[in-house]
Amino acid sequence: MLLINNLSFYRNNTIIFEDLNLSLNNGQITQIRGKNGSGKTTFLEVILNILEPKNGDIFWEGKNIKKNIFNFFNVTTFIMDQNTSTKKLTVLDNINFWKGLCASKLTNADILLLLETFNLLKYKNTKVMYLSKGEIKKLELLRLILEQKKLWILDEPYNHLDNSSIEILNQTFKDHANKNGIILFASHFNPSINNLEIIDFH
């Protein structure tokens, strides 16, 4: 369980959010929804200890993440709205780099199947610089499966995706939740996911 208790963040004495409480249980998918500039990304960065809150605490499995930050990161995959792939490397080169970094247990056959599922197999030897924004986004999202972590935190995961890719991502979310995974994502998009918890930022 991820528990957020009385969390507040100010920027230049301006309240971005205040006294926010949230609990995310196993199998739960939660969306932070709001327009650009409403504080969605800031909220995720506070949870991930990138930004320091004004006050409040964040707990993972009953332990304050500040005292157990490495354990928290070990169970978390964070997909930013900005790309982490290296443009001069091929799709497979990037995947193999990520695979080594997180000590993924996926086999080469698993990865090829994953590329096929996300309609990226034909680009496996293509340098990222030659991919479209949607194709790069799908490559970034492959890390969700590759890293095999319990908690997924994503910022604007639906940006640049076409309808078929949106369906694939929705199903990926559902599959993870069905395996008792936890998903928290920020987006202005309204995905078709049953039992989706929504928190509106204004």
Image (tube, rainbow, N blue to C red):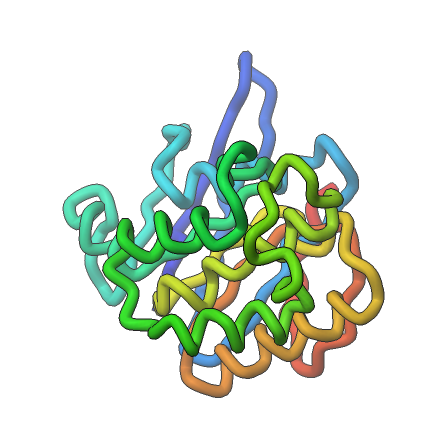
Q: Nearer the viewer, residue 21 or 74?
A: 74
Place of residue 73 in the rendered image (x, y in percent of width and height, measured from the top left): 28, 51
* In the image: residue 12, left or right of residue 147: right
What residue is drawn where x is 69% and y is 52%?
Answer: 135
Task: Give the residue at the far top of this rendering.
Answer: 12
Residue 35 visible here: yes
Instruction: Identify the image quadrant of the C terminus.
Output: top right
What residue is drawn where x is 70% and y is 36%?
Answer: 38
Task: Give the residue at the far bottom of this rendering.
Answer: 178
Q: How many marks?
A: 0
Compared with residue 16, is residue 149 higher up or lower down, i.e. above or below?
Answer: below
Residue 18 visible here: no
What residue is drawn where x is 71% and y is 77%?
Answer: 193
Task: Give the residue at the far right of this rendering.
Answer: 163
Instruction: Identify the image quadrant of the N terminus.
Output: bottom left
Place of residue 132 in the rendered image (x, y in percent of width and height, measured from the top left): 75, 44
Compared with residue 115, is residue 199 higher up or lower down, i.e. above or below?
Answer: above
Task: Give the residue at the far left of this rendering.
Answer: 67
Compared with residue 129, is residue 31 higher up or lower down, i.e. above or below?
Answer: below
Quadrant of the image occupied by residue 192? bottom right
Place of residue 126 in the rendered image (x, y in percent of width and height, measured from the top left): 60, 48
Quadrant of the image occupied by residue 175? bottom right
